[in-house]
Image (cartoon, rainbow, N blue to C red):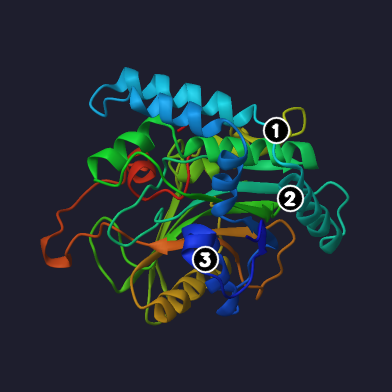
Amino acid sequence: MATVFKIQAGGAEEFLGGKGLRLGELVSMGCSVPKGFTVTAGVLDAVIAATDLNTVIDAALAEVDPKDDASCDAAALKISDAICSTQLPAEIEADITTAYEQLCYETRTLTLQVAVRSSAVGEDAKDASFAGQFETYLGVSGTDAVIAHIKRVWASLYNARAIQYRARNGLGLHGQMAVVVLELVNARAAGVAFSADPLTGKRDRVVIEGNWGFGESVVQGVVTPDRATVDKADLRVLDYAVAEKVIVSVYEPDQRLVVEIPMPALFRSEPVLNDEEITAIAKAVREVEETAGYPIDVEWVIPLHRQAGDAPVLVQVRPITTLPEEEKAPAAAWNPAAYASKYAFGQKNG
């Protein structure tokens, strides 16, 4: 069993999970993708088999009533505590350490800040989605911290919402979780983009949502982002709505994580993207959709020192699992919190 797999074309979802697989697909399309690696899905199983975690997990899940929130919360807490406090087998810990140190070397950064993200098998399927249920951590640095946050992501496989979702959909109480570790791109702006309008269902539009800083404020739905609508055929900017953005995601050195803080006043009402950046994002989204063959949403980043003409960095892509029919779609107001629960790639604290 391979412990880690470099972000590259190839591989299979049963080993890499949805995120890890699709990042490799983006690489094969020639997209700009951060360097990184995936801790494969079988590693958690190997850790469970090599320790007494199996006993703890089975005992906790045996007490679960999927209709009872309290029993799910109690099971999730027991399992999380057990996974996060478990010492990894030496070989697995060494493999992850080597992969992180190699990533630091490739990026010429001694203690590289990374994103540690869930990549559950079936997480981003076209007919079902665990979006927003598992953990994502941005700004993690140092080997010990990376390993600790990988464990936290594993533990989120058994959070209360995930347990209940699997039970409701007949998927069993267990699951499989790979973990993606990606170079954290220093973001001037970030957000999400759709190859079809998620409100109206129009397939001839690209819709872009963005905020200053890192993209967590957008994917968590804690800020009303700027919203651009682009004609997919000729990439004309049809509309740009500048929002009053009161929250921003920034790197906090003391916590060594990306956190949300109040937006500085001068940035709140200023447009996040210019026309060239909007066009570049829309073009990238259109090209990915053409290759994928179905409507997609992506998480994009405009790096701090990006030059005009450079491609945006894409850090995730997945199918849009719920899209209204164009002719039946009612007019609807944009609701960032509703977006986060329906479309978001990952959400902290649940």
Asked if labels 2 and 3 touch by Cβ distance under 8 angstroms, the answer is no
> The disc labelled 1 sits on which kind of residue?
Gln
> The disc labelled 2 sits on which kind of residue?
Ile
Q: Quadrant of residue 1?
A: bottom right
Residue that mark 3 sits on: 21
Q: Which mark is residue 125?
A: none
Instruction: Compare marks 1 and 2 and give the one earlier in the sequence.
Output: 1
Question: For this view, does 320 lie left or right of residue 115?
Answer: left
Q: In the image shown, does 225 or 191 lie closer to the viewer?
A: 191
Relative height, residue 266 to residue 187 (above, below): above
Question: Which x, y percent locates residue 173?
Answer: 35, 38
Q: Residue at x 23, y 40 (%)?
A: 168
Residue that mark 1 sits on: 87
Q: Is residue 246 visible?
A: no
Question: For this view, does 110 lie left or right of residue 56?
Answer: right
> The disc labelled 3 sits on which kind of residue?
Leu
**Mark 1, residues whose alpha carbon is within 10 Å: few (<14), some, or many (≥20)?**
few
Between label 1 and label 2, give the one nearer the viewer.
1
Between label 3 and label 2, give the one nearer the viewer.
2
Label 3 SS: helix
Label 2 SS: helix
Relative height, residue 5 to residue 78 (above, below): below
Q: Residue at x 30, y 74 (%)?
A: 204
Q: Residue at x 74, y 34 (%)?
A: 256
Q: Is residue 123 visible?
A: yes
Relative height, residue 171 to residue 274 (above, below): above
Cα distance between the residues tagged 3 and 2: 19 Å
Residue that mark 2 sits on: 96
